[in-house]
Amino acid sequence: MARPATRYVCQSCGAVAARWLGRCEACGEWNTLLEEAAAAGPQARQSRAPPVGFVSLASESAPEPRTATGMGELDRVLGGGLVPASVVLVGGDPGIGKSTLLLQAAATLARAGRRVLYVSGEESIEQVRLRARRLGLADAPVELAAAIDLNAIAAALERSGAHLVVIDSIQTMWIEAVESAPGTVNQVRASAFELTRQAKSAGFALVLVGHMTKDGAIAGPRVLEHMVDAVLTFEGDRGHQFRILRATKNRFGATDEIGVFEMTDRGLAEVANPSAIFLAERRGNVAGSAVFAGIEGTRPVLLEVQALLAQGAGGTPRRTAIGWDGGRLSMLLAVLEARAGLSLGGADVYLNVAGGLRISEPAADLVVAAAVVSAATGMPTPADMVFFGEVGLSGEIRQVAQAEARLKEAAKLGFTAAALPRRVARGARPLAAPEGLELAGLGHLSDLVARFRKPGRPS
């Protein structure tokens, strides 16, 4: 009997090698090649399918119908709700609350009269029931199953009439015809393809839970993310009560929206006004603290940025940032020294975005600079002032988008002043600033540093 052919597949990128290698030649990862049986492909046959039909680019289509999940923050990230026959991949670190979020959404839909199926490959039915009782969802008519055999699951989903199907998680699914262990590239790819095919043909919304790697990426082949319609990541610090749901891909909505949740003993609670929550514990008379008026998707969010300078022990000073890019912090510190004359004296610099949210937009440059200058001089920033603006390598403060939305959110929370790029404050187009909000236009970082060397706000 002929020995079945084998191959070695990288579990990080899916590359195939004829023999085992310590390091994958495609992605460079070490010890990721596992031996798998090479499936014998069917003989090529002449396709008898009817020809594909084409339509005009100018033709109109009805908008995709949506079903609200009952959780406003989740619906915001999805673009308005679940779309029938769509596939959503939800990733996040272990214990961050992915299963809790989806169980709450499933229970809300089931109570609204929709048929919801929840398949767990990691926990038993009793464990899921215990979580439901803890969350106060024991009476929700969600139908549960604990299984990893995808053939059995597919048979149950056939003609089930389900509106929503949750698979927790895709890395635990197993197909007998694929000769590899659950969680390997071949198993994840084949399982996701079969589930996606069923969702498209049967018309139910499918949500797949995905594991995260140590690098912060969703485990499995990259084709998994291309296969689904939306990719959501659930972020947050397990020691912090806030959780951020962020869309990194969405075929039916925007990819820059976020949803904010608070983890409580009764599950995840929606945070309708995250700015007020993030600033609830702020003390305005402390040096090294400044408020950032940011934008996350279409939502303005106010955050506190904290900086601390400590005398270094010699050698290379430390640059540590939590919630912001460390490389951008080093660049900004260099600009402050070279262009604004601020001498940091080799001090260690620590930066923290309070609340656990991660800032990625360049508009945070000015607030970080303000926090660092405040910490270096020992002079607090005005308690009623917000900051936003991008900083260039020559020290100029550049304009940013959606200034009016940032200012409106600041005025709503009681702030009376805003430091922003001068071209925005005094541009050719009048800025519709809220009444009673004083605008301090800054053109260069030297203007910001000068404000901390003499009393009064910048003009």
Image (spheres, grey):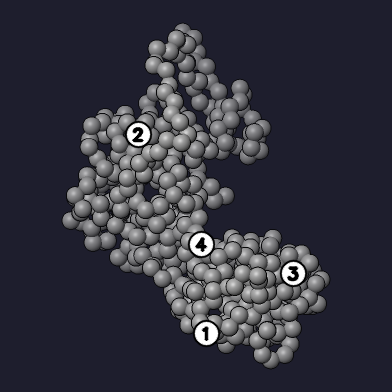
Let me know if residue 4 appears in the view.
Answer: yes
Element type where label 4 sits in the image: strand
Whole-angstrom CA distance, mark 1 to mark 3, is 27 Å
Compared across the picture, whether 210 is left or right of 65 comes to right
Identify the residue at horizontal 34%, vertical 56% (top origin).
Answer: 100
Compared across the picture, whether 449 is left or right of 212 comes to right
- Label total for image: 4
In the displayed structure, would residue 137 be above or below residue 221?
A: below
Compared across the picture, whether 89 is left or right of 351 comes to left
Q: Which mark is in front, 3 or 4?
A: 3
The foreground one among 60 and 281 is 60
Let me know if residue 184 appears in the view.
Answer: no
Identify the residue at horizontal 62%, vertical 83% (top origin).
Answer: 381
Q: Which residue is mark 3?
A: 396
Residue 264 lies, in percent from the top left, at 35, 67
Earlier in the chain: of badge 3 and badge 4, it is 4
In the rendered structure, find residue 200 and report the number of the disc placed on it: 2
Element type where label 2 sits in the image: helix
Q: Which residue is mark 4?
A: 296
Residue type at the position of mark 4: Glu
Identify the residue at horizontal 38%, vertical 60% (top origin).
Answer: 73
To which quarter of the image does residue 117 belong?
A: top left
The foreground one among 222 and 298 is 298
